[in-house]
Image: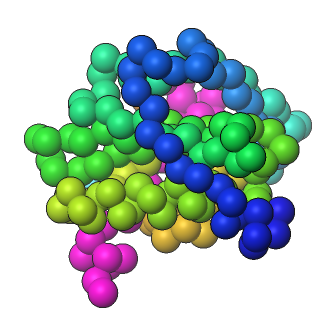
């Protein structure tokens, strides 16, 4: 997609009860993951994250909804190109710690790696600044290396992980949850 096509992308807000769909289905492929090792030592812990090849490539499939009950103050946006929605992003404001969170960022296949996702992330950064939050965060699985690379390329940094977000066997199953953020101390100074 060229720069002129990106200029034709329009970001629109969607509202609960007026979505043109009930479920979003999405998938990604990966050949690698971030291997997480947590060693407890006498004087603390040693935590190591290393990019490593998977024994064989995997396909991850998900089905999700927007405006979930657990999202505080949800706002949903779509990127439209030629009148068609090609990407969706759900944000939520977390009042208790003054953070904005990207709950979902889904791009239709065929429109990935074309710059549209970066437009929505930039939009989220602007909304976060306007709201005055201290940080914009997103979370993804440690095996979703394409998403991690995308967020890193767009100014996010790793701030932590949850070794049991999905199950007690997350490390063994190679699917820990990586938390990534942009904070206003480093990235938002103008």
Image coordinates of residue 186 in percent, x first then y, are 31, 79
Q: Is residue 170 visible?
A: yes
Q: Out of 22 and 181, give the one closest to the viewer.
A: 22
Q: Out of 155 and 17, give the one closest to the viewer.
A: 17
Q: Out of 185 and 90, give the one closest to the viewer.
A: 90
Q: Which residue is drawn at 35% across and 45% down?
A: 101
How many marks are shown on the rendered structure?
Answer: 0
Work out which residue is located at the far left of the displayed protein and give it. 96
Predominant SS along the magenta part: loop
Q: Residue at x 42, y 44 (%)?
A: 102
The C terminus: image quadrant: bottom left
The N terminus: image quadrant: bottom right
Snapshot quadrant of residue 134? bottom left
Q: Is residue 96 shown left or right of residue 92?
A: left
Q: Residue at x 31, y 76 (%)?
A: 188
Residue range of the region highlighted in magenta in the rendering: 166-190
Image height of 150 relative to 75, above or below: below
Residue 181 lies in the magenta stretch: yes
Q: Is residue 40 shown left or right of residue 49?
A: left
Colouring: rainbow
């Amino acid at each position: 997609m060229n720069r002129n096509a990106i200029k034709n992308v329009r970001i629109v807000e969607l509202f609960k009860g007026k979505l043109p769909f009930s479920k979003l289905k999405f998938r990604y492929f990966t050949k690698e993951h971030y291997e997480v090792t947590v060693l407890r030592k006498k004087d603390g812990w040693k935590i190591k994250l290393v990019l490593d090849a998977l024994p064989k490539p995997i396909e991850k499939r998900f089905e999700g909804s927007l405006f979930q009950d657990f999202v505080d103050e949800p706002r949903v946006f779509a990127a439209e190109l030629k009148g068609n929605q090609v990407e969706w992003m759900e944000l939520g404001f977390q009042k208790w710690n003054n953070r904005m969170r990207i709950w979902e960022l889904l791009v239709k296949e065929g429109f990935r790696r074309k710059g549209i996702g970066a437009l929505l992330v930039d939009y989220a950064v602007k909304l976060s600044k306007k709201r005055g939050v201290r940080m914009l965060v997103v979370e993804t699985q440690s095996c979703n290396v394409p998403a991690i690379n995308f967020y890193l390329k767009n100014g996010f940094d790793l701030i932590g992980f949850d070794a049991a977000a999905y199950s007690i066997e997350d490390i063994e199953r190679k699917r820990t949850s990586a938390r990534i953020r942009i904070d206003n101390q480093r990235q938002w100074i103008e």
